Each structure stands twice: as structure tokens, then as C-alpha cells.
Amino acid sequence: MTEGAPKGFDLTTLLAERGAERYELHTRYLNHQLPRMLHTIGFDNVYERAEGAHFWDADGNDYLDMLAGFGVMGLGRHHPVVRKALHDVLDASLADLTRFDCQPLPGLLAEKLLAHSPHLDRVFFGNSGTEAVETALKFARYATGKPRILFCTHAFHGLTTGSLSVNGEDGFRDGFAPLLPDTAIEMGDLAALERELKRGDVAGFVVEPIQGKGVLECPPGFLRAAQDLLHRHKALLIADEVQTGLGRTGDFYAYQHEEGVEPDLVCVAKSLSGGYVPVSATLGKDWIFKKVYSSMDRVLVHSASFGANAQAMAAGLAVLSVMEDEETVAHARATGDLLKSRLAALIPQYELLHDVRGRGLMIGIEFGRPTSLKLRSRWTMLQAARKGLFAQMVVVPLLQKHRILTQVSGDHLEVIKLIPPLVVGESDVDRFVEAFTAVMDDAHGGGGLMWDFGRTLVKQAVANR
């Protein structure tokens, strides 16, 4: 700031003066491995603005977002209705978070959420997906008087200590023991579920109806059968809808794809925020909440300092209103069906493309071992260095050559996950399929640049061992 300039905080000026230092600042003060990783794979772009399912760099190039901030941007970026709601709530100067009153916005948002969840009765508001899961774990253990939670292998429910205890990926758990007394079973293994329940110490079973890692659906009938087993043993079904909920899979909740499934506790977050204010919700049955909050002495036995704040509640109410007005759930189902069918039609053309799966706008594209000798030798080279490198080879040119942002669906997986904003349309589907086809043509035609990048990834993987 020049000498004599007026004092005070001005965000626009600060960003203009220091915004170009973004990677240096992150390296110096935050997680230093993130910028290193972004530089390595060529994802170190500088984005200037965003709207809907697109963002733009400093040169005015537009990028298609097929990642949605890991699912946070359900309505896309900067939806005008959500923006207005936040301006309105700030301008209202509400007496927020006094802690000793009952503001209207939390009750109104709970009412609106529960209208989509008619078998549930009450809501606890927190700030993130992992906090929603932590709440469900605590409530299940207290309500049942039992200590143990069951979860699925390959599950992801968050990274705080309780949620980490039900994380199915060892890479996240390593070095953070001891964790809670929890046990993993294979998704769909009812015999294993019943075996664990017979031990008599299980409070509940937490499950993603579609796992984010790998985009793996629960087998047909599994959730209903699991629910029946759990209730027979006085344990609870906990549905983690943090990523799959609020229309992502073509129903309001993913568990609604299976008739008769009525979880005892449901966790939501991500899209409920409108992409602005962190918010989560744990929905549950009346008897569970009344057991946890059993007396006035226990009124604050579980709470969150910023839970149910006015800005978060306003964002959530605006999101649900937009979803109703714009028929977002039906749009996600139709657009997802179109995208999935067009990608599945490519499988016979490309020997490296093995499967396309998922529901709505949560789609997994899986690659596998080719049959031709030339491609098989290159595939083997990548697999020997590190599983998942081919999927990364696809993600990188999608961004660098076609300006489409995607992600590998998990460590050591040859799967790309597509979770775009639910507002993507047919033209976005066309753009993605055309770009993906070009990348597949390059890979199968022995394109030098793509396989050269593969060799770079192999060297990096070997160096990191």
C-alpha cells in the first residue's frame, strides 16, 4: 500500500496486489504437497472467475467443471438465487448465534429437508460432511447403548477421528490409531453383516448407497435386507448421503432408488451449502433425538458453535427452493442417463475402456487391461509402477487439451469419477463425450504425447516409493 493511502481492509485491492502469489503462499504456509502435486500433473492453472458449470482463466478460456468441488457445487457456481439469499440475510442484521434463543431459519430449513424425508423427524445442523457423520455415530452409539459401528470396505465418510474410524481406505487411516471400535465388511455381504450383528455390540451400520471411491453401487436389495437385519438386532441403519444426496443420483436421496429403505439416520452436506457457506445436516428419527437430548441437563450434550448460523440456513433454504423451482432432481436424472448411455456406447470401440456405471450425475468410467500386444505392454508398464496411472493419463489431457476438469476416483484405481454440477446440459454432455473420445483415440492410436506423459508419471511414482 502506498504511503498516505487510507487504512482499512479492501478485498479487491488485496487480491489485485497479492493474488499472483497464490501457489507460493500455499507452499509456504499451508499443505506444501498440494502445489507440488498440481505442478507435477500440470493442474496448476490460475482461474479468475466462475459461473454455473464453467470457470475461466485469465486469458478468457472457459473450462467445463465435471468435478463440482468434490460435489459441493450442486447448483453450479454463484447461482443468483443463492447469492441474493446471502445478500438478504447479511442485510437483515439478524441477532444470530446468541445461543439463547430460537431463530426461525433453522426450523424452516429442517422442515423443508424433512419434507423430502417423511420417515424422519428431526435435524441437527453442523458444518461439514464429516461432522454430520460424527453426529450420526455419536447418536447411534448413545441411542442403542452399544459401542461398535460397521462400515464397508472402500468407504469414505470423512477424516475426523470418528469418521476416520469408518473409513475403508488404509492410506487415510495409517498412523492415526487408535480409532473407534469399528469393523469393515464387504458391500453386499449380508452374511458378514449378520455375523457381526450376532456379537451383540453393534450400534449401527453406516453406508454410502453409492460409494464415491470407484462409484460402486450397493447391490440390488442389499440396503433393505441390511435394514431388516439391523433392526432385528436393535441396531441402526445410517445412510451417508453427503455426496449422493440432494439430487445427485436422480432421486433426492440415493437410498430412495430401493423401495422400502428408511434409514434411521441420514447425513447430508456438500450441495446444501450452495457452494458458499459450509453446512451439514444429520436427520434422524424422533426417538433417537429424544434419547440423546433426554433432559434439560443434556440440552447441549451435542452442539456446534457455528451450527445453524443464519448464513448457512439461508443458503440451504435457497438451494432447496431452486431445486424445486428448476426441477433439479429430474434434470440430473435425465442428463445423467444421457451422459451414461453415450459413454457406455463407446465401450465396444476402445479396448482400454471396460465399464461405465453409476446413477444420475454420479458416473464412474473404469479402464482395464487391453487385449492387443502393443497396448498391453504399455498398460503393464504403468501397472508395475503404480495402479491408477492410466486414469491419471486420461484426466490430464482432458484438462490441458480440452479444458475439462475431472478426477481419478481414488488412489490405486483406474476409474474416473464424474460428479458435475447438476445444472450441466446437453451441450456440456456433447463437449465431454467429444473430448473423451479424442483422448481415447489418442491412447489407442499410440499418441506420443499421452504415453510420454505416462512415462513421466511412472518415473514420479517410482521416485516416491
Image (cartoon, helix red, strand yellow):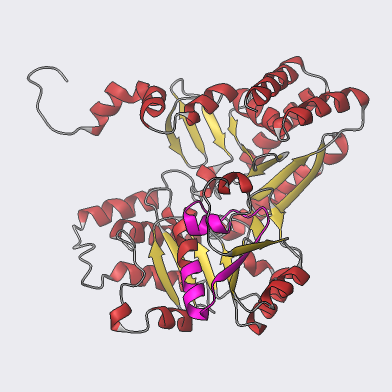
Taking depth in this image into account, of 193 and 310 the one nearest to the observer is 193
Measuring from the top left, give residue 440's x and y in whole percent. Answer: 77, 29
Magenta stretch in the rendered image = 137-166
Left/right placement of residue 167 relative to residue 78 reads right
As drawn, 463 above or below 268:
above
Left/right placement of residue 464 relative to residue 90 reads right
Residue found at x 83% / y 21% = 445
Residue found at x 48% / y 33% = 55
Report if residue 226 lies within the magenta region.
Answer: no
**Looking at the rendering, in which quadrant would you find the N terminus?**
top left
Measuring from the top left, give residue 307's x and y in whole percent. Answer: 34, 62
As drawn, 2 above or below 47:
above
Taking depth in this image into account, of 313 and 291 the one nearest to the observer is 291
Taking depth in this image into account, of 348 and 237 the one nearest to the observer is 237
| One can see residue 269 in this view | no
Residue found at x 89% / y 22% = 374
Residue found at x 49% / y 24% = 45
Measuring from the top left, give residue 375's x and y in whole percent. Answer: 86, 25
